[in-house]
Image (spheres, helix red, strand yellow):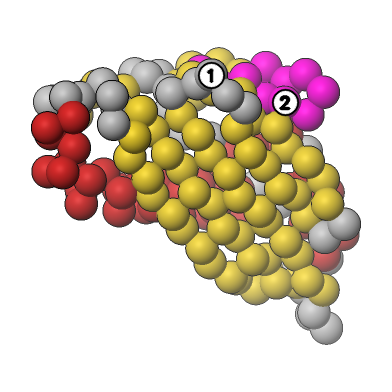
Amino acid sequence: MPWFEGTHSETRTLPVDASTLIAHLQDPNTMIAATKGLENASVSDGVVHFVMKEEDHGVVKFKGEYHCRYEPIEDGVRWTSLDGGNLDQSGEATVRALDEGCELTYRETVKIDLGVPSMMAPMLKPVIGPMMANEVKDFVKRLVAGVP
């Protein structure tokens, strides 16, 4: 089955202390709380097992299940999916202190294995890639909305 990919990057200024935002990003439960369409999730040693609710887009149905490792870095967090799921995500969120607040730089690539015939992939890629990138953009909004 074909894999589809979407990437989103952004930088935004937030009116919070850099250390507060870093701590928020380094907590895997933060990522779980900001994930839309989640059926359930569990955390073990920095690895989150995500099980998504099935999405029905008419021709295409998708139910994501994957494991993602979150690794704290000095100025944020880096993540990558482990082998074996039908959804793969990798990225990095870094924080830079400013005189007033901080700057968040976020970038993520999401890949999904859709159960569609290979001959349909060229028709769907121009639609699904931007749709996935938009989902990441919405995720970042939920992520920063939850900063304490």
Q: Which residues are magenta?
A: 42-51
Q: Residue at x 75, y 49 (%)?
A: 77
> SS for tag 1?
loop
Q: Residue at x 46, y 29 (%)?
A: 87
Left or right: where 71 falls relative to 88: right
Of the residues shown, which amino acid type is indicated by label 1? Gly
Q: Which mark is residue 47?
A: 2
Q: Which mark is residue 107?
A: none
Residue 29 colored magenta?
A: no
Q: Residue at x 36, y 28 (%)?
A: 113
Of the residues shown, which amino acid type is indicated by label 2? Val
Provide the residue designation for mark 1: 84
Percent position of residue 146, x then y? 65, 47
Report the Cα–Cα distance between label 2 and label 1: 14 Å
Classified by dominant secondary structure, the portion drawn in magenta counts as strand
Percent position of residue 32, x then y? 62, 31
Percent position of residue 53, x then y? 40, 19
User: Callout 1 environment at 10 Å: few (<14), some (14 to 19), or many (20+)?
Assistant: few
